[in-house]
């Protein structure tokens, strides 16, 4: 199968890629993807608006599924990553700069300079952090919790998919704010992580709770002020029964619904009305302008060890399909990162 | 059956009441209520914090159902009304004053002074308006549309139950703001009213639209910026498919769901996320402080005929049960008012 890149270029490096065989419907499978190799000249065409990147860390995120349902077969997967600039005519990006932004799941990428989000200025923290805590998932947690959640000290916060790339930060931000925070996750290991490493007040394995409404009533006898929704479906429905007056529900994701031909019906929405709840979908890029403020807030906490970040690191492009597919069964523990190259 | 009021008081007037026979489940029926008479002394007990009222206009509203599910049998129905003060020791309310607030469905009521919302200062408009356009429904439309809806000129607005007490005002407020507005209602007469009297750009009878998603796509080829939700359920689900990015859904009511043992499931909530929609429940009383500003805005429009209000007026307490029950089958055209006494 001919890769999309490199056909007309005389190559002098091999460019390994993870490509999609076809559009994906429902949850993705490893067999939806394959590893191919092409050759690539490490030279930018003259006058190009593109930047030539060597990909280092690739971020595996659930939203990537939406990019796969309507894609040209044979294209490499698209997602956020950390990369090194090999060549650029753009004034902001010079050879050797480290950047993070939208790239492709391959060793080398030519991307439009507009797809680069930010040049990486702080390298005293792990570079992989720019796929997670200091990248899109971090900004998602920050904007969703602080901007949409409007948290106040002493409030009660519930987070689903709480050990994931975003959830683990929401819980820690809630603790920094002086909130009581409970997380749900899908295994005993994750629950232990939430309680013992990430500082959640309580955590439970939703797979072992047959009556989520009763579970939430147990952990939140006075109700929930902020529900940070990563999963939707049955969990959201149970939460709606337990919201407090003037509660907030930032809707970050609804991963439980992504593979369903017919989504589960949410039946308790009348509680939005009686409890005057604000439920709001968002994407991090609407809060792009807050990134400098976000770094200023978070970098000191990371350096002082007051905010930690759990990564699940897969090594090598060959493990990309498994790492990505694993997100949908909850196989990863913490933020799923794929190392394409260490430097 | 002994009425709750007047048992220990030597009476000198007959006080006719509409009482609940028992708690209501599902939609109310006329037989859930009965008309009874007691006698009442028109004299306030010394040192009382209550105010003795003669009820004039009573407001029949869907939310009253929530007050009926957990009520002491034999109590009169509770709701908003316009009344004349017969006796009061409260400094703000003197004999002969007109007020609106929470009262009971009976001829005379003793109510705590805290239940009175406002003294009526402007009597050049119909007094019944203080149960509707200038009362709780009016404030509901105002707060929901302007405060939660954040409308901008040129935006696309959809209103369900659009000829009702609240909906007809939302549509007119949308036109005053320079929006395009479409309403749905449940009969041809109501649709005609929306288009010919209330100034909606378009209107349709939802009972004649088998595919609401297609209907909305027809009226909103570019999508909906603001959906003012009065009904919930299937309509909300179809709307979610048609919201624009950064749309707003003030949730005022979900009347389609109130009689269901198991509410309909809403399946399209992932659109909140992808479209970054804000959906928010509210009650007018959270915006109580805006009432003076609201009057200042609306009274001139009423006097100049730029905002009109359609009332469905039932005469006499005896017609109270039918007027109330009719709300749930959409029998009323416009705001349902019950005249208890004209003065």
Image: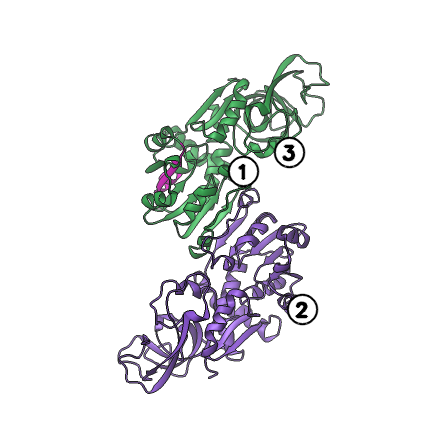
Chain colours: A green, B purple
Separation of residues labelled 1 and 2 (CA atoms): 44 Å
Residue A60 drawn above or below residue B57: above
- The image shows residue B49 at horizontal and vertical percentages of 30, 75
- Disc 3 packing (10 Å; few <14; some 14–19; many ≥20): few
User: Which residue does the numbered mark 2 point to in the structure image?
Assistant: B196
Separation of residues labelled 3 and 1 (CA atoms): 17 Å
User: Which residue does the numbered mark 3 point to in the structure image?
Assistant: A70
The one nearer the camera, B25 or B122, is B25
Classify mark 1: helix, strand or loop.
loop
Whether the residues at callouts 1 and 2 have beta carbons within 8 Å, the answer is: no
- Disc 2 packing (10 Å; few <14; some 14–19; many ≥20): few
Residue B270 magenta: no
- The image shows residue B159 at horizontal and vertical percentages of 58, 59
Query: On the same chain: label 3 and label 2?
Result: no
- Quadrant location of residue B55? bottom left
Residue B210 drawn above or below residue A149: below
In the image: residue B36, left or right of residue B145 = left
Residue A176 magenta: yes
Classify mark 2: helix, strand or loop.
helix
The one nearer the camera, B314 or B25, is B25
Q: Chain of mark 2?
A: B
Residue B177 drawn above or below residue A126: below
Residue name at image x 62 percent, y 67 percent: B190
Label ID, residue A96 = none
Return the residue found at the far bottom.
B12
Whether the residues at callouts 3 and 2 have beta carbons within 8 Å, the answer is: no
Q: Chain of mark 3?
A: A
User: Which residue does the numbered mark 1 point to in the structure image?
Assistant: A260
């Amino acid at each position: 199968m001919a890769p999309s890149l490199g056909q007309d270029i005389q190559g002098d490096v091999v460019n390994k890629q993870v490509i999609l065989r076809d559009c994906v419907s429902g949850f993705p499978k490893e067999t939806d993807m394959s590893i191919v190799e092409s050759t690539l000249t490490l030279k930018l065409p003259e006058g190009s608006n593109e930047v030539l990147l060597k990909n280092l860390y690739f971020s595996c995120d659930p939203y990537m599924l939406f990019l796969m349902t309507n894609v040209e077969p044979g294209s490499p997967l698209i997602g956020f990553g950390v990369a090194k600039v090999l060549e650029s005519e753009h004034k902001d990006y010079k050879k050797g700069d480290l950047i993070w932004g939208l790239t492709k799941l391959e060793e080398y990428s030519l991307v439009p300079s507009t797809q680069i989000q930010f040049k990486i200025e702080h390298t005293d923290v792990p570079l992989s952090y720019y796929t997670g805590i200091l990248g899109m998932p971090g900004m998602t947690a920050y904007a969703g919790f602080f901007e949409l959640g409007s948290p106040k000290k002493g409030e009660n916060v519930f987070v689903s998919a709480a050990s994931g790339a975003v959830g683990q930060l929401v819980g820690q931000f809630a603790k920094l704010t002086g909130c009581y925070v409970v997380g749900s996750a899908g295994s005993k290991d994750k629950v232990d992580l939430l309680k013992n490493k990430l500082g959640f007040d309580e955590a439970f394995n939703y797979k072992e709770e047959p009556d989520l409404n009763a579970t939430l009533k147990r952990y939140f006898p006075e109700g929930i002020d902020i529900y940070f929704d990563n999963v939707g479906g049955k969990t959201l429905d149970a939460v709606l029964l337990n919201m407090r007056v003037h509660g907030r529900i930032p809707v970050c994701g609804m991963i439980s619904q992504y593979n369903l031909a017919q989504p589960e019906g949410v039946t308790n929405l009348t509680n939005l009305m009686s409890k005057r709840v604000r439920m709001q979908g968002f994407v991090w890029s609407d809060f792009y302008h807050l990134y400098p403020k976000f770094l200023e807030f978070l970098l000191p906490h990371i350096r002082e060890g007051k905010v930690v970040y759990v990564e699940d690191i897969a090594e090598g492009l060959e493990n990309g399909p498994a790492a990505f597919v694993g997100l949908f069964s909850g196989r990863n523990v913490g933020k799923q990162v794929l190392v394409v190259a260490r430097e």
